[in-house]
Image (cartoon, rainbow, N blue to C red):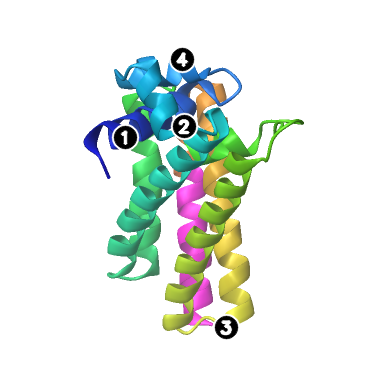
Amino acid sequence: MPPQRERIIAGAADLIRRRGLAGSTVRDLASHSGAPLGSTYHYFPRGKQQLAAEAVRFAGDLVASLLRQGLDAGPVAGLRVFLNLWRQTVLDSDFRAGCPVLAVSVEEPPADADPEALDAAAEVYTAWETLLASRLRDHGVTADGAAHLATLIVASVEGTVAMCRAKRDIAPLDRVTVQLERLIETAIDA
């Protein structure tokens, strides 16, 4: 991938996690990454939805990579890596940034265009759930139990990140961390 294209995608992911997709124009996304507007349209001829979809996949892949590394040490370790990533994101941004996948997910898709960014968000959530469920199954959790717990983990984390931003307080994430760790330990011991 050309470095300028990658820089535009990374910049778009950062701006979307701060402002949301509706609050960002293609011009804003280009400017935030330091790229000329013409380059943005060159690399993303379908416009904002294409760029947002690529930004969501980019962020999703980064998170999945970190999650995978953490899960190599076990489901609880993977959970801690996943939660710590969001904890640091929220704190380092002074509660101004969350997850670009969530930001795209909660917005109305365009009525006149393919909801490419929303489709990408669904793909990312599925990938995270699949990764978590696989590792839970590897540690003895039933297939159904692993799938349900993986969905609960992703939904809890994404929702709690939003709560932390709204409350400007990290305590909800810390409380959810404790409860999810207990649920994982219980599922593994069952």
Q: Secondary structure at mark 1?
A: helix
* Crowd around label 3: few <14 · some 14–19 · many ≥20 (10 Å): some
Residue in the image at 51% along x and 71% along y = 133
Left or right of 41, for residue 109: right
Q: Which residues are magenta?
A: 175-190
**x, y (%) of residue 47?**
53, 29
Which quadrant would residue 147 be assigned to in this image? bottom right
What's the residue type where badge 1 is placed? Arg
Q: Nearer the viewer, mark 3 or mark 2?
A: 2
Quadrant location of the C terminus? bottom right
Amino acid at dot 4: Arg
Q: Which residue is mark 2?
A: 98
Q: Is residue 183 visible?
A: yes
Residue 5 coordinates in the image, percent (x, y): 31, 34
Whether 136 is drawn above or below 119: the answer is: below
Give the class, few, some or many, for how many residues have Cα within 10 Å of label 1's Cα (few <14, many ≥20). Answer: some
Q: Is residue 185 magenta?
A: yes
